[in-house]
Each structure stands twice: as structure tokens, then as C-alpha cells.
Amino acid sequence: METVGNIPVHVSIIMDGNGRWAEERGLARTAGHVEGVESVRACTEAAVECGVKYLSLYAFSEENWGRPQAEVDTLMKLMFKSMIAEMPTFAENGIRFIVLGHRQRLSDELNAVIDDCMYRTKDNKNLTLVVFLSYSGRWDILQAAGKLAMELASHPGMAASIEELDTSCFDKYLVTAGIPDPDLIIRTSGEKRLSNYLLWQGAYSELVFSDILWPDFRKEEFREALRTYSKRDRRYGKVK
């Protein structure tokens, strides 16, 4: 297999372009989401093959709840079916599966399947696959601030050290606590924005924007993004 250079620990993908892919082919938008599942499978396999340790996917944002109900329902059913279908693959490839986001907005049935999948894969070590579902960066920061406020209210003595709070202290209140910040964020479909995704965690992530619509983004496109990343000089605001 061709080497792709310096491998990031954590790659995150904003999976964009499913609807446009379907519309270009005269299909219902939901057909793009179905085809997009194949891209998820291909990129997950490529991540394992390349030695990436964390792969995270922006599957459904808080704002996506405003989409037509039929599309929302299809996406949730697709998530439900995909998790059940992929369990053998997770076991075979040593993939730990995690869902992060505002899960209170999800159905009890979907949450039950998520919990089961997370429990059954919790000891897998080759790759951690994180799916962000009903997530937004602003929501994450706000809920983290709420957790901190509640902790301060319960332990008034902590207020004396509030001025010593640094970014590493705040990290533990985010839903991504324990997961390294993404080294690389990829966005497909030609759009060049973060769309309220990992606003805190992505502060120093390298960004790669691809014109390819998500359903057409497969292993070679994933490896090309890694090659682009390997050529970057990450300075974190410093001088080397």
C-alpha cells in the first residue's frame, strides 16, 4: 500500500453533499444519504489501514432537525439500521464505536441501539469511530459551561480557583472529554466552512476542503487528504 506520510492521530470529516449527489442524478435526497453509508464504510476501512486511531464523522447537527421531517426520519432509520449491520465489521476490525451529541433529542429506540453498540465495542483498540449526532459546537460549549456552573454551585470553594481555570480544565466538561482534538478536519462537497462543528476542539486542526460530494468520497480520496495533511507544517501559533 502506498504510504501517505505523517499519519494524524484523529481525522474528522464533515460529510457534505449527499442531497446534491442525489439531485444531480434525479433521485430523492434520501438516496444520497443511503449511498453515503458506503463512503463511511470505505473511509473507516482506510483509516484502519493507514493507522489512524480516531475517526470522527459529523452525521447530524442540531440545526439539521429543521430539515423536512421525511428526510430526518430517513436519516434516523438509516443510523439505526447501519449500527446493527456494522456490528460484525466493528468486531472483526477492532473498532470502538461512540456517539456524541445532544442525545436527549433522539428516540428511545435509537438510544438503546447506540448504548448496546457502544457497550459491545468498548474494549476494541484498533480504531475509535466517533459519530456526532444531534451535535453543534456552540451547544457543546454551552453545555460544558452549564456543567461547570453546576459544579461551582455544588462546591462553592471551587470559586477561589476559577481564575486558574485553563483550556485543559475546561476540556473535561465537553462531550469529547478523553478524545484527542482532531489533527485534521476534512469537508467534502466544495463548501469551505466548519458549520458549527468542533469549534473548541478544532482550534488548531488542519483543514482540507474537497470538491467531491460525500457519496463519491472513498478510500483514495481519504488517502489524498492524508497526503495533503502530511505536507503541512503545524506551528500552533509558534515559530519553528
Image (cartoon, rainbow, N blue to C red):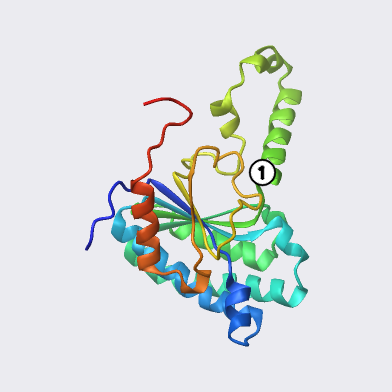
* In the image, farthest residue toward the top: 160
Residue at 33% in and 47% down:
230
Residue 28, image x, y percentages: 65, 84
x, y percent for residue 117: 50, 62
Left or right placement of residue 73 versus residue 185 in this view: right
The image shows residue 67 at horizontal and vertical percentages of: 75, 68
Q: In which quarter of the image is the C terminus?
A: top left
Is 76 placed above or below 120 here? below
Could one spot residue 58 in this view of the protein?
A: yes
In the picture provided, is 78 more to the left or to the right than 205? right
Quarter of the image that includes the N terminus: bottom left
Q: Residue 185 versus residue 58: which sits nearer the camera?
A: 185
Residue at x 58% of width, y 69% of height: 17
Q: Residue at x 47, y 67 (%)?
A: 40
Secondary structure category for the residue under label 1: helix
Name the residue furthest bottom. Answer: 26
Which residue is the site of mark 1? 140
Residue 90 seen in this snapshot = no
Badge 1 crowding class, 10 Å Cα cut-off, few under 14, some 14 to 19, many 20 or more, is many
x then y, percent, for residue 148? 69, 30
Q: Which residue is at the front of the view, 182 or 140? A: 182
